[in-house]
Image (cartoon, coloured by chain):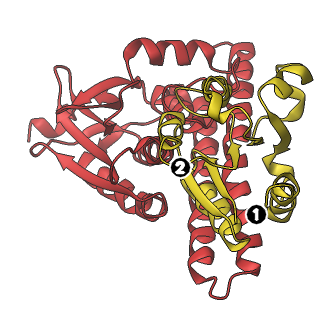
Chain colours: A yellow, B red
Amino acid sequence: MAVILLLEPDTILGRTYQATLTKSGHKVSWFRSAGAAISSVDEQLPQLVIVELQLSTHNGVEFLYEFRRYQDLAAIPILVLTNVPPLFKAFSVGIWEQLGVVAYHYKPLTKLTDLTRSVDRILAPVT
Amino acid sequence: MTNRRQHFADERLLQLLAEQIKLPLLQIARQAELARTTENPLELLNTIEDTADSSLKLLDSYLLSLRLARAHASIQLEPVSVAAVLNETAAGLSHLAKQYDCKLELHLSGRYEPIMAHRAGLEAALNSLGYVFIEAQSAAARDGRAVIKLAAHRGKTGIVAGMFANMDGLSADMFKRARHLFGQAHQPLTQLTAGSGAGVFVADSLLASMSARLRVAHHQKLSGLAATFATSSQLNLI
């Protein structure tokens, strides 16, 4: 079992992703805002962060920069699960690597089975 | 509005709506996938039904906005009971609000004479606003349930009717910027919602057809989006 931090602003999707990953045996802490997600890591360090880039107020990229400011969070892998199409990715591959993004999934093309497969692959060495 | 400007506005609204409608389709697809592996999928099926119903309403509101925009000069405004429209809108949004764990409240400060409006257009506008407010407030709720008020009060020039909530980022400047970004940005209402906020612009278009402008307004201590309607002078005389 791994602890996963899920940053998903939509209630229905958040509930769905949380239920799916919980069924796969993970403990999922789900937050709808970047601020709440950042505050949560003081209480429990996640082994994986899943983040939507399209948030209100602070976007997901701002969240990632803030997240990476803390040394104890530096090694935690990030999975982007977003409505922003890959073509719209504003940064070069290097920036995503620097931010620790190990997988980028476009939501409309990512089935729940794709998500769980990707999560299991990322967590494989540590579980 | 010239034909070219109208065409451009239609295109921008359609683009935002397409972005917006991706969300409920995604919710339906993923919940259906989850339902296949769930022992008792009744709750998921209910959510799928509510999601589809509210998306259909948003699409219908958009289509009505197109029809009213085309017929702008010939729209017949009629005396409409604001209380009845707010009541019906609240009832129509109640399922969606439940799915998003939002509390929807109706607040009418007093009794009002009928307002001059296009009834179906007003209901569609409030419904479209509700769609955005429910989604946005649910994401912003910090402690407990988000509360959204469908409300009306008497303003200086008529009856103000709209939707209100505890929204820190909503201001006249922010809404002005959003109007400016309409059609240019992927997300013109970032201070309000993570989605495209198409419902706000559908409501804006519907209300403009009734010569009522959507604007940032306040009700008690809440901020929101509302329009002011003239009261029916004919019935005032009775």
Query: Around disc 1, counting alpha carbons within 10 Å, would you say few (fewer than 14), some (14 to 19), or many (20 or more)?
Result: some
The chain ID associated with circle 2 is A
Residue B117, image x, y percentages? 36, 37
Residues at circles 1 and 2 in contact by the CB criterion of under 8 Å: no
Is there any visible trace of residue B115 in the rendered image?
yes
Distance in Å between CA atoms under marks 1 and 2:
32 Å
Q: Quadrant of residue B1?
A: top right
In the rendered image, which residue does mark 1 sit on? Answer: B29
Q: Secondary structure at mark 2?
A: loop
- Asked if marks 1 and 2 fall on the same chain, the answer is no
Extreme-bottom residue of the structure: B39
Find residue B168 and report its horizontal and vertical position in percent.
35, 27
Amino acid on which disc 1 is placed = Ala
Residue A118, quarter of the rendered image? bottom right
Q: What residue appears at the point 74 percent right and 32 percent down from the top-left corner?
A: B15
Image quadrant assignment for residue A61: top right
Figure check: B229 above or below B59:
above
Q: Chain of mark 1?
A: B
Label 2: few (<14), some (14–19) or many (≥20) C-alpha neighbours in 10 Å = few
